[in-house]
Amino acid sequence: MKIGKATILAVFLAIFLSFFTSTPSQSIVAAGDLELNFAEPNTPISGNVIRFGGIVANAGDVSLSNLGVRVFLSPAINSRITLNNELNNSGLTPLMRDAGLRIEISDLAPDQRSIWSTAYLVDQLLADGDGVYLVGFQFESDDVALDFKKVAIPFRSTLESEITPVGISLLWPVASQFKTDWQGALPNEALPESLISTGRLANILRAGQGNLVSWVIDPALTEFLNQASDGYLIKDNFGNFSPGQFSEEINLFLNGLQFLADSTEKWAMPYADADLSALARGEANSAFEQAITIARPVLENNLGAGVSGVVALSPFGSTPTDVIGD
């Protein structure tokens, strides 16, 4: 079959014009993700250094350059309505201002990630007095925002200053993530060191002192403190045991916690990692049931006082219905 010149020309023009008129099946996108993994101490006091850090990632199709994490800061908030409105808005709000601080990030190729961190003097960052501060972090490329995360930081300028009531219940969690082996030995001194001087748990205990807070206490932590008050072991990576160095500090912290919680409202935090052997012995129907039922008596035994109940915390705000069903 012979194809005429006019037909060939028409086909050629159609193909040529399609490059200008058709929409590409995949567009090139510049995108980035920011994770805020820690803000510590979470109850800073005057004189502390406050640290923030996380991960940024190139989530798009093109390389990103001139990258940074810009810091935004709210004034001290002492209004329930204002705090509620700010927290319900996950993005940057007009209340939050550019703090003039930027953490520089190296260029990222597509799918590449980078760790970021920064630290400031508390008195430098939270200089507006007592209240709740919102600290925001904007991941940007060439001053174009790619992602934004923020964290609420309650601040008291002195341990004696009172928390301004904002019409909400203030839960004061005393908890720590730690692992022990079957003999109760710790892998390192990280937990005991958090109980001394300006350690994380010591800061939490002091910052809640003298205020109308509801203590939410990890029963696993108090159980360990009681057991370790007469001594504890550290087991290194080679399986060697050595005596722990902070038994006296453990005693002081436990006594302080028992004293502070004695005259205020206190709740038990359920075990985050249920012991399956205890589950079998207790004949509980599920790890969730065991975690809820043993939390209260264990905490009462270790504190030497009754508690109001168990606060069932969940990372997603509610307990899944299938777990409740179990």
Image (cartoon, helix red, strand yellow):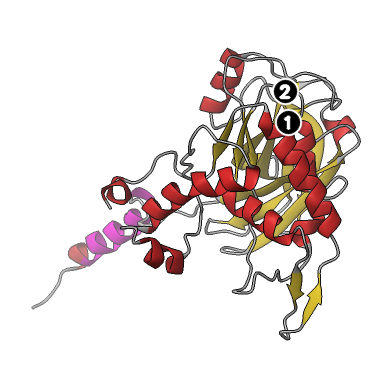
Task: Check contact, mark 1 vs mark 2: CB within 8 A.
Answer: yes
Q: Quadrant of residue 76?
A: top right
**Residue 164 seen by the camera:** yes
The foreground one among 81 and 189 is 189
Q: Quadrant of residue 70?
A: top right
Q: From the viewer's perspective, tell me whether residue 145 is left or right of residue 314.
A: right
Residue at the far bottom in the pictured view: 238
Q: Is residue 225 above or below residue 162?
A: below
Quadrant for the N terminus in the image: bottom left
Q: Quadrant of residue 259?
A: top right
Name the residue that disc number 2 marks. Answer: 211
Mark pair 1, 2: CA separation: 6 Å
Q: Is residue 296 above or below residue 11?
A: above
Q: In the image, residue 277 lies at what x, y percent?
A: 44, 69
Q: In the image, residue 239 lies at what x, y percent?
A: 71, 84
Residue 308 shown in magenta: no
Q: Which mark is residue 208?
A: 1
* Residue segment shown in magenta: 8-21
